[in-house]
Amino acid sequence: MEFEEARLFMESNHPGVISTYQRNGAIHNSIVVCGAYKGNAAFVAVRGNSRKVHNLRRNPHCSVLSVKSDWRSFVIVEGHAQLFDASNTEAEELQILLREVYRACGDKDHPDWEEYDQAMVDQDAVVVLVPGWQNLYLATVGGRKV
């Protein structure tokens, strides 16, 4: 499977789960709204102090599952996350990235970008991209490929 196939699925199926690794090796799962952004699986962690962000800073290996709302088809992207936040990205660049990933994860604009921008600053939001994916999986129930 190529990422193009995963991208097509992720562009229209945004419910998801990010799986990260805790210090003791156990898997930590978090529900996210995800999408495809410039050849990467992508999502915004709206709280920079969340467990998923903490885990990804320590160990960037993760998987992102994007699933249809009926849970009958899904894509899993495995790889090493790259995190973009106020500590490693210029403010204007981060604002643009947050907006673009928001659109990629929901197919629409926010109704109030100024409010969104301020909330992302206040919550120390982090953009998570999973580039250079290691493994891709596509599955359907009933044998019909998406």
Image (cartoon, rainbow, N blue to C red):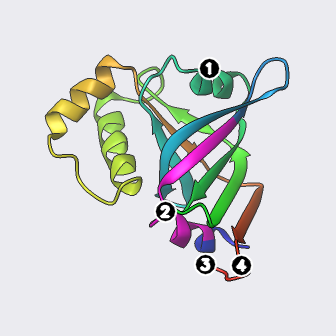
Numbered label attached to residue 146: 3
Whole-number angstrom distance, CA of label 2 to CA of label 1 = 26 Å
**Amino acid type of the residue that numbered disc 1 sits on in the rendered structure:** His
Q: Quadrant of residue 23?
A: top right
Q: Label 2, on which residue?
A: 13
Q: Are marks 3 and 4 in contact (CB under 8 Å)?
A: no
Q: Are marks 1 and 4 in contact (CB under 8 Å)?
A: no
Q: Label 4, on which residue?
A: 142
Q: Quadrant of residue 140?
A: bottom right
Residue 14 horizontal side relative to residue 23, left or right:
left
| Residue 2: percent from left, percent from top | 69, 72
| Magenta segment | 6-19
On screen, residue 11 above or below 86: below
Whole-number angstrom distance, CA of label 1 to CA of label 4 = 37 Å
- Circle 2 crowding by C-alpha within 10 Å: few under 14, some 14–19, many from 20: many
Whole-number angstrom distance, CA of label 3 to CA of label 4 = 11 Å
Numbered label attached to residue 54: 1
**Closest to the observer, 110 or 80:** 110
Residue located 35% across and 47% down the image: 102
Name the N-terminal-most of marks 1 and 4: 1
- Circle 1 crowding by C-alpha within 10 Å: few under 14, some 14–19, many from 20: some
Q: Nearer the viewer, mark 3 or mark 4?
A: 4
On screen, residue 34 above or below 10: above
Q: Are marks 4 and 2 in contact (CB under 8 Å)?
A: no
Asked whether residue 64 is drawn in magenta, I would say no
Q: Nearer the viewer, mark 2 or mark 1?
A: 2
| Residue 17: percent from left, percent from top | 60, 44
Numbered label attached to residue 66: none
Quadrant into which the C terminus falls:
bottom right
